Amino acid sequence: MDSSAETSTSSSADPRPRSDSGAAEDARGQTLVPHIHLGEELQETIDKFIVKLKYSQKYGSYTTAREAALIFRKIVAACRWSSAKDLILLIKREGRRIVKTCPAETVIGNVIRRTLKIIREEYVNATQATSTGDGASLEDPEFKESLHNLFVSGARSDDFSSHVQGLKTAIIDAINEFLSELETSVDNIAMQALEHIHSNEVIMTIGKSRTVEAFLKQAARKRKFHVIIAEAAPFFHGHIMARSLANNKPPIPTTIITDSAIFAMMSRVNKVIIGTHTVMANGGLKSVSGSHTIALAAKHYSVPLVVCAAMFKLSPQYLCTYDQDAFNKFVTPEDVMSYAEGEILSKVHLVNPVFDYVPPELVTLFISNIGGNAPSYVYRLLTELYHPDDDEQI
Amino acid sequence: MDQTDGTGDPSGGRGGHPAMNQKNSTKAERRAIQEAQRARKANIKSSGESASPAIPITRKSSVASSNNPGSCSPSTVAPSAVASSTVASSVVAPSSPSVDSATARSLSNSDQSKMATKHQQGPPVAAARGVTDVARAATRQRSFNSDGSTTVIEVGGALGNLGIFSHLPVPERGLNLAKTLSFSSSAIHPAILKLGVQYSSGIISGSNSRCIALIHTMKQVVVDYETPRDKVLCRDLESRIKPYINFLAQCRPLSVSMGNAIRHIKWLISHTPVDMPDTLAKSKLIEQLDHYVEEKIVLAGKAISETYAAEKINDGDVILTYSCSSLVSKVLIDAHRRGRQFSVVVVDGRPRMEGRELLKRLVRNGVKCSYVHISAISYVMPEISKILVGAECLLANGYVMSRVGTSQIALVAKAFNVPVLVCCETYKFCERVQTDSIVHNELGNPEDLRVPGLWSSGQEEEPTMMSWLNLAFDVTPPDMITMVITEIRLLSSTRLLDSSTPRLLDSTAPRLLGSSAPQLLGSSAPRLLDSMMNSSSELASLKVHDTCSPSSPNCFPLDAL
Amino acid sequence: MDKDEIQGYFLLTVKEHPEMSPAVAAIKTLLQVLNRDLAETMSELRKNLKDAIACLCETDSYITGTSISSGCELFLRFITLAALDHSDFEELKKILLQRGEVYLETVSCSRSKIAKIFRPFISDGAVILVHSKSRVVLQALVGAQEKGKRFHVYVTEAGPDKSGVEMHKSLIAAGIPATVVLDAAVGYIMEKVQLVVMGAEGVVESGGIINKIGSFTIAIAAKEHNKPVFVLAESFKFVRLYPLNQKDVPNNFKYNQATLLRHADLSKEHPQSDYTPPGYITLLFSDLGVLTPSAVSDELIRLYL
């Protein structure tokens, strides 16, 4: 969770890359959505959420995820839908509306996918419970298109349209479960800290991440270590992080360095532990500006790069081109150069991107709330988390 | 920063003694300084005159405090003069009789007034900027105690903890330096004092500027010098300069460029014929110093810009540069004037933000520029076709020491396959070898890292376990550098170790520089020589040397010397 | 069906459908074998099919063995899996034939599916290096072009049969600006390109690929320049094979059948394909979706376990 991601005062985010035919499908999907009205109150909640996302200064990815999940729970609970199919379309419609306003917030897309997956799962469970028959082939691993399925199953078709008793409560229960998973994710990650930090280590991190903060504080209960923090200018979240760690009980000795001293200091660092905004499908990261540098420096000195990221940050997106415009977010360049420098300002092109792409080969380990994983294993987690049909459409 | 200095930072600056009354503390601390100074003097006396004044004052004072019978404080390790002096004060203050404190005060006053007069000597020579600087320095002097005690926390708290920079001198701002001047030390030339303050406050920074300023000041020193009756210039002047250099080194560690220049100056002085009349010797020295600047810096820069770098900047290039190098700015502006169509991305890093200076220069000259912070480097890198950076010095193992952040640029550039070109005059070559940025570096003032307005007012108190590290330089490994552009030729930094190395390194050795500078360039490219001929009539003799010298680059005519 | 008949049918299929992958042709042939087969028990059928596969593998043509063997292996597995579910032989046969048709149909869509998922990875103004001839790569590029993407393609000549020249012709015909470069010019051209795209004859368990000779060289050059290498391959090209290095790749994957049948001294023959380890491949695009190289072994394990 790089909070830097959230400091978008006047964010002008580029739209997320999307398969061109996707748009056509979207249009088709849209027409299929039955006209289910959300009701005034719900509509308002969603609009408020959108506004908050757009303009709010500090909005952590955890909060975003939680609020999004709450909204979807409300939709499930409050709307009158007749079948799972309707509900899926409804969630997709509303989800798209939210995502469109802030495409850089991948977390929302992830929550939508999780919700859809929950609906599908609960539907299958419910149908299986009622009629123990063909449903078996729909069970989890088979969902994914695989070599195996190409042969075994013929044309599989279940359009989730049949009405099932008790589906609503089942789905709401499942979403509640998801919410509690969100809540505990940071603690669950922090619990693993002692397995990764030994005594007298020198650890480097960049900016501020709630997850990493908890992780280090947990480790500090038993171990002594030193943390070097790159300040992540122009947002300076590193300063906040450093203060928080140093004020911890027991205090963690911290040293703040400029972003330019990352490589110079890396030769004395044992481990780099960073948070991230998103984990991409190939195991790469979309993380605060400067992460790529820190990752390259770590690689240069063969220092392990550990990424703390909860499961809800896993996104089935790939970085399509190496042109980082596509997935980045740009915020006001005021921080880079103050508007006071008018004379020069008018003649200079200023950029203040929020994110960096870190390729998977630079990442040593992911620590998520369910344990440690290699970046090459991320695709596997993704197949468990989301339904393939939902991957690209949001 | 200056503001907090001036006002004495009532809230947090006092570090460990927030409750202490300001007046009392100043008195106590003044006493402390006196105590420390006396102890130091005694120490120097006892250890004889052999004690090298080159040792930074910080060490001496810590020695002093350990000599002091009372100082058994656990924090004596802290290599800060102020640290030990506060220790001394806490010990001395209760025990010492009032007489002692009175003398101390008077001593202190006299010391300060002495300093002040010294500074007042500065302005006549100084430009308007210098005046303000001295004034600022004076304000600082008043408040250095509060400033200093913050430093103590940093040293004890953080660097002590990480413990890998305790070998480097802790930066002292402004007239903390004043304490380093003991009473007995022979008067330091006002121009040198001024220069020292300018160095330490960052008014003069950058390898080339510092070197030029040094030589300029040395010229003044030479002008004002008069040989005492029973001495000879070639011995006395050299010994006169020594404390000056030490003083400058205390203000800010000497750069390699300055080190090389100083060696050259010393060589020049010691090779002045004993029987030469003063006036003649002085004018000759001044001429030679001018010559050094002209040839080693101005012409070298010109040769780099016009002969080599010009070839490497093509139409359509997007050139990235980092921080502010006078040489790089010259290269870019020259190329622009020559009509090359290219744009420049200026990358900058905190806390110095020197890139803005470069940006201003480029924009004023009409170069198309972008400006980003160093953390966004990997966002801009795919667009970049070349990277051009300056250097602080080129080490003998091919590593390039430069403004901190340069190595990072090179690292990211390597990941994106962008060639990295380093512009470096040969006078910045250095015999030292180094493989990381920690063994030998310079610490900047950690205060500079603070971001004003980041904390709401209630949060000003800083946790003791939090510290700041402000590195000045880093080293870039040769495998990340595609090319080093010198005025002699283009070099691959990995190939510095081949047969050409000793020659290039020798070329910076003072013994060669002194005799006949043009010979240095003896075997180098005629193009360069031509460009130099045009601009410098002093080098008229050059052609003769050139034709004499063998054409093989490995055969250096000066080997015979 | 006897040997000549099988080979004849296979070659005819390949000839009639030049856009068809040899693996699909092989599967089609096997379905034909299955259809006409007179066996009455499972084991007999299996034996007959194995014989047929052996015949196919000996087909004397320019087609390399990799894709044929991957297709055949998949087909056998397909039979085995079906046999687990259905005990009645006649019914089984019927189901097999029916599923086979469905499968062939699915497979025929796989290229367009790959083209679709690959499309966002081509940015406007991209410069792409393509190795040799690959139908799926061609379709992906043409598809992107039709969707309005503008890009330039460098095609390696791909000796010894200069299949790259053929590829170049097809690209030009589709209106895509393309240039043929010598195989030896890969190092030179790499600086200019943004991404490398190649097909594969086979995708092995490690996630690496076996492809036209020169692929490995290109992948190495790309790695040195930190350029992404994308492999486009249909899922029927997944082979159960885990080569350690070039030498470990079976001979029938590396040499022409003709060469092997001649019992020529292989040390004097030039291999037709090489093995590119997974470390050099950025992503694999198949009809199963975008896969990281490590996902390939997962897929294979799921099928064969």
Image (cartoon, grey):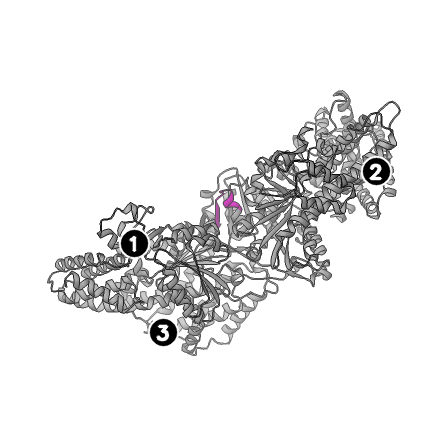
Residue A304 among those drawn in magenta: yes
Q: Nearer the viewer, mark 1 or mark 2?
A: 2
- SS of the residue under disc 1: helix
Q: Is residue B402 visible?
A: yes
The crowd level at tag 2 (other Cα within 10 Å; few <14, some 14-19, many 20+) is some
Q: Amino acid at mark 3?
A: Ser
Same chain for mark 3 and mark 2? The answer is no
The crowd level at tag 1 (other Cα within 10 Å; few <14, some 14-19, many 20+) is some
Q: Are marks 1 and 2 in contact (CB under 8 Å)?
A: no
Residue B203 among those drawn in magenta: no
- Identify whether B558 is placed above or below A316: above
Same chain for mark 1 and mark 2? The answer is no
- Return the residue at label 1: C301
Q: Amino acid at mark 2?
A: Gln
Q: Is residue A216 left or right of residue B428?
A: left
- Return the residue at label 2: B220
Occupied quadrant, residue B163 = top right
